[in-house]
Image: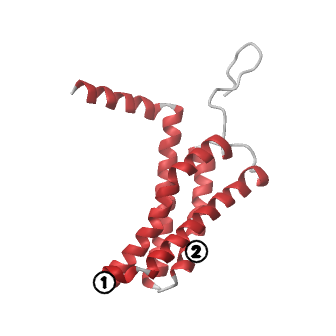
Amino acid sequence: MGTLIEKIRSLIRWSRSSEGKKAIRYSLTSVISAVVSQIAFFLLYGVLSVSSKTSSITSTLLGAIPSYILNRYWAFGKKAKNSFWGEILPYFIMAVIGLVFSTWSSDFADSHKTIIGTSHLAQVLLVDGAYFGSFAILWVAKYIFMKKILFSVSDTPATVAGGENVN
């Protein structure tokens, strides 16, 4: 029991650290973006009967907008001016990789959806699950890429001559 309490305390300390706050904000940003994408996909594919490919592409692009904004400014605390070559283009490439993978996944599930029967809802949930699952697979890699490369910022406060903290 003492070990569990220590692990919980350690997790709480980590969640209050700069690294912990980033990871939590990234996770919340992912939830928000996933909700936007999932609602769009379900409406397009499940309600409006748009093809799985078009639904996937549209939903991914709609989810990428809040994802970029929230990750850049909130999760990773980037305040400097946006850089097309250093941030926007690499983020777009990362989004396209997710788009290709999610489109392939949902299209594959769509072409094999009859294996679970004829229920429209079950088929929609299968295809939607494949769409969602593709992003779950890429989630950790995206975090590392954004943290280490795309939105890398120093966690140490800036100082002026004499050691005064300027933040």
Numbered label tally: 2
Q: Position of residue 45 (x, y in %)?
A: 47, 80
On residue 58, which mark appears?
2
Instruction: Describe the element under mark 1 as helix, strand or loop.
Output: loop
The residue at 48%/49% (across/down) is: 27
User: Which residue lies at the image location 47% right of the left edge and 51% below the top edge?
Assistant: 28
Q: Is residue 29 left or right of residue 12?
A: right
Q: Which residue is mark 1?
A: 117
Q: List x then y, in percent, for residue 136.
A: 46, 57
Q: Quadrant of the C terminus?
A: top right
- Marks 1 and 2, how far apart in space? 27 Å
Q: Position of residue 62 (x, y in %)?
A: 58, 68
Picture quarter containing residue 58?
Answer: bottom right
Q: Nearer the viewer, residue 122 or 25?
A: 122
The one nearer the camera, 62 or 120, is 120
Residue depicted at 53% across the width and 35% down the height: 19
